[in-house]
Amino acid sequence: MTKNSDLLFEPFISEKLQLPNRIVMAPMTRSFSPGGIPGEDVAAYYRKRAEAEVGLIVTEGTTVDYDTATNDINVPEFVSDAAIAGWKRVVEEVHAAGGKIAPQLWHMGMARGKEVGPAPEQASIGPSGLVAPGKKVSDPMTMEQIEEVVAKFANAAEKAKEIGFDAVEVHGAHGYLVDQFFWEGTNQRDDEYGGSLLKRTRFAVEIVKAIRAKVGNDFPIIFRFSQWKLQDYEAKLANSSDELAQFLAPLVDAGVDIFHASTRRYWLPEFDGSPLNLAGWTQKITGKPAITVGCVGLDDEFIKAFSGGGALATNIDPLLEQLQRGDYDLVAVGRALLSDPDWAVKVREDRFSDMTPFTKEVLGSLN
């Protein structure tokens, strides 16, 4: 029996964003937008989750206007007139269902690989040309490239506001471009963008500031970050709460309104000596609203589903205990909402036995 689930359905009210409840749909790449253009099926997919009481939807990663931002022509982009029209339709459908929605703005950086995607003839870009620690495959980004990417993120955010999105999220996690600047393993620069942890935040800070200049003071900016990387699940940006404070402070000063703290398992403490997870520490340090995420509603981590395994639905009592303590404000649900659009309704009605498990087969049939 799940306890205190009413907590999830209390309104979230902050200075710039008001939501009917605390449930967020986490961004999850699906590659169901041929040519990078989200179609009516994508609009219907998101509307279905909004109709089922998801308070805020964060879209799958949408690539900014840079030729090597993605390795997949079926990942939605945030560039062409056709794609913007598609996203406008998505926004209208979600709003018609009573939901709110934010696009996740994304650049894969060196994680794109090479000879793939919309521009296979062009090399991938990253702070030091490293795809992983010690694996250099291209030259470091030039100042011109850095300035161009910063501007592309800002332009995409401006478009998002113009077509009616309720916020934007910057993807600064999981070993993609922004996170490649954060991580010492992929950032070996000796200029103002590399070296100390503080200097390694500069690229992200410039992106956030550029977005703020485009969207104004009242439009919410969400920032997603993680300790772990696709290249190294055990990687750490911050080994202590003091280091985490050093990392977060410049992002707060730049204009981040909400932090989305990505972990693989939400119930694990981030540092020794405290029960707080990464979102809990983030809220405590910054005073900003924080979103937790990581196996919410499922009993195993995501990677198992892609190696022939899966994950079963489970109750969320540990999460509700953390929410009751006030560790964080919002809860992002990923795979559980992929496989079961009615997840939120079933939680409210305590119907965990009716939930759909997450498997590779379910993922393949989502459209």
Image: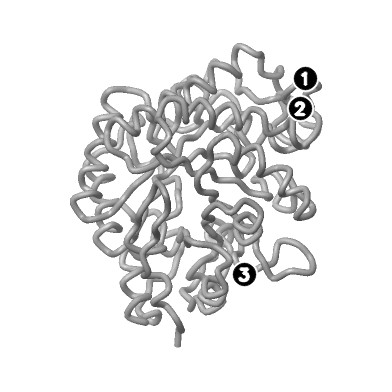
Tag 1: Cα neighbours inside 10 Å, few (<14), some, or many (≥20)? few
Q: Image height check: is 330 above or below 58?
A: below
- Count the labels in the image: 3
Per the image, the residue denoted by label 2 is 194
Residue 267, numbered label: 3
Residue 198, compared with residue 16, is above or below; it is: above
Type of amino acid at the residue the image marks with label 3: Trp
Q: Residue at x 39, y 42 (%)?
A: 167
Q: Earlier in the sequence, mark 2 or mark 3?
A: 2
Given residues 121 and 146, the one toward you in this image is 146
- Residue at disc 2, secondary structure: loop
Q: Whole-Å distance between the Cαs marked 2 and 3? A: 32 Å
Q: Nearer the viewer, residue 348 or 123?
A: 348
Q: Residue furthest bottom?
A: 1
Name the residue tied to disc 1: 191
Q: Quadrant of the N terminus?
A: bottom left
Q: CA distance from mark 1 to mark 3?
A: 38 Å
Badge 3 marks a residue whose secondary structure is loop
Nearest-to-viewer mark from 1 and 3: 1
Q: Residue furthest left?
A: 96
Residues marked 1 and 2 touching at CB (< 8 Å): yes
Q: Is residue 141 left or right of residue 300?
A: right
Please tell me the numbered disc located at residue 57: none
Q: Position of residue 56 (x, y in %)?
A: 36, 54
Q: Is residue 154 above or below residue 105?
A: above
